[in-house]
Amino acid sequence: MKFLLMVCWDSEKMNAQTEPDPAEPREEKSFYWVDDLRARGIWLTGDQLAPPRRGRAVRVRDGKTIVTDGPFVETKEAVGGFDLLECGSLEDAVEIAATHPIAQMGTIEVRPLWGN
């Protein structure tokens, strides 16, 4: 089964981060948590998201597209990254989420995918 881990932490700290220069090549950094899960064949993909201030919320109401600049709601935590796992059960995914380094200071929301 596939599970999405939504990695949430302090939105103010995310918004305060210095953004990478898009002209500079992005170096692959080793991350022990991902390295371990990748070696075990569990981690499929994941990435850090740009801060909430860089996002847009899109809604369509009565045929009209409404775009709102971020941040969208006053919240202490925001989704700052994601990991897609393939593991045997929700319990396995929760156990893995508990080992994520951000779980010590933020929240990891675990959701099963309904797709194939």
Image: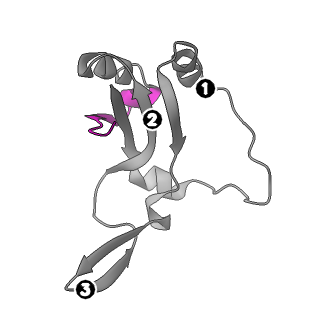
Under mark 1, the amino acid is Phe
* Label 3 SS: loop
The answer to if 110 sits in the magenta stretch is yes
Cα distance between the residues tagged 1 and 2: 13 Å
Q: Which residue is mark 3?
A: 63
**Mark carried by residue 31:** 1
Could you tell me the amino acid type at mark 2? Asp
Q: Is residue 49 above or below residue 99?
A: below
Residue 93: name its quadrant: top left
Left or right relative to 17: residue 3: left
First reached walking from the N terminus: tag 2 or tag 3:
3
Residue 114 seen in the current view: yes
- Give me the residue at 74% from left, 46% from top: 26
Percent across and percent down for residue 44 are: 50, 30
Which residue reaches farthest front?
Answer: 116
Task: Tell me where the magenta segment starts and ends, as one range.
Answer: 101-116
Residue 26, placed above or below residue 34: below
Give the residue type at disc 3.
Answer: Gly
- SS for dot 1: loop
